[in-house]
Image (cartoon, grey):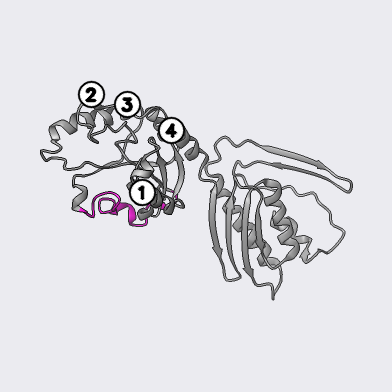
Amino acid sequence: MKKVLFIDRDGTLNIEPDDEQVDSFAKLKFYPRSLYYLSKIAAELDFELVMVTNQDGLGTPANPEENFWPVHNFMIDTFANEGVVFSEIVIDRTFAIDNAPTRKPQTGLLTKYLTGDYDLANSFVIGDRLNDVILAKNLGSKAIFLRQNDLLGATEGMSKLEELSDVIALETKNWEDIYTFLRAGARKVNHVRKTNETDITINLDLDGTGKANIKTGLNFFDHMLDQIARHGGMDLDIITKGDLHIDEHHTIEDTGIALGEAFAIAIGNKLGIERYGFCLPMDDCLAQVAIDFGGRNWIVWDADFKREKVGDVPTEMFFHFF
């Protein structure tokens, strides 16, 4: 499914003037580095770009169209010349007092994105106002809050922003941070896998601190999964409910599948990731691992075990898990 960046205009792509209307070329100042980094986002990342803007009273004496369109069209052409093309430009013309269902943060003009054809959970609203954060919540997306003014949160309700903290994926003052964040991916995943034999929920944060909460019903399996989190420096929660009354096979197999799927989602398009190898000499063994995330599934396994089980896990399942 398509991912979308819903991007505000004034205060996000340009510097919003005190009267909140960019209705002359004298008032137009592009937000620093917005052209450069948005062009990199458009060229390198897989997002559809949609502009969403409230233009109070557009077409009325308060905001004449003959003043608005020349500047607006110049902005659009300038971005297009840098490879930034908006698939749609959504403009609401009402005043805030109208409380219209089409006015941001309402979604009345964005219903086409709510049909299930878009991956809204991995889409973002980029904007400089509280309304942009609320729009992200209403869409079921996350917000990138471009706070160019330290007082903005206070003037629009700091307490409200704190209530929406779980919606804000990134808070910054510059477009470089936005590009870096989007290029890396959110790197946090909530993944659920259900079959006739197992019900698995995984929360993974690749940029965590090594915290783990593992409950699979197999104590030694829990211990080994905990080591992945601890030594990988990631936060990992795994809750597996499996048919252990039959045997361990489905629980271990399906947990491995679900964890692999979670890593694949968190890593994203894998841009910039190189092949990796590690060697760990210990008193009783020598462990060597080489990993290539190129997408070609293959495993070479050279490990001998003298016991049928380690703890409550059959040793034959170690190869199967990896």
Q: Circle 4 sits on which residue?
A: 174
* Residue 150, percent from left and from top: 40, 37
Q: Secondary structure at mark 2?
A: helix
**Mark 1 is on which residue type?**
Gly
Mark 3 surroundings: few (<14), some (14-19) or many (≥20) residues within 10 A: few
Q: Is residue 101 shown in magenta?
A: yes
Identify the mark nearer the N-term, 1 or 3: 3
Disc 1 or disc 3, which is closer to the eye? 1
Per the rendering, the mark at residue 81 is 3
- Magenta span: 99-122
Report the predominant secondary structure element of the magenta stretch.
loop
Identify the mark nearer the N-term, 4 or 3: 3
Q: Circle 1 sits on which residue?
A: 157
**Mark 3 is on which residue type?**
Asn
Per the rendering, the mark at residue 26 is 2
**Mark 4 is on which residue type?**
Asn
Q: Is 179 on the left or on the right of 275, as rendered?
A: left
**Mark 2 is on which residue type?**
Ala
Mark 1 surroundings: few (<14), some (14-19) or many (≥20) residues within 10 A: few
Identify the mark nearer the N-term, 1 or 4: 1
**Going 66% across and 37% down the picture, which residue do you hit?**
275
Determine whether 300 is above or below 223 in the image: above
* Residue 259, percent from left and from top: 61, 55
Label 4 – label 2 distance at C-alpha: 23 Å
Disc 4 or disc 3, which is closer to the eye? 4
Q: Secondary structure at mark 3?
A: helix
Q: Nearer the viewer, residue 306 or 181?
A: 181
Q: Is residue 250 shown in magenta?
A: no
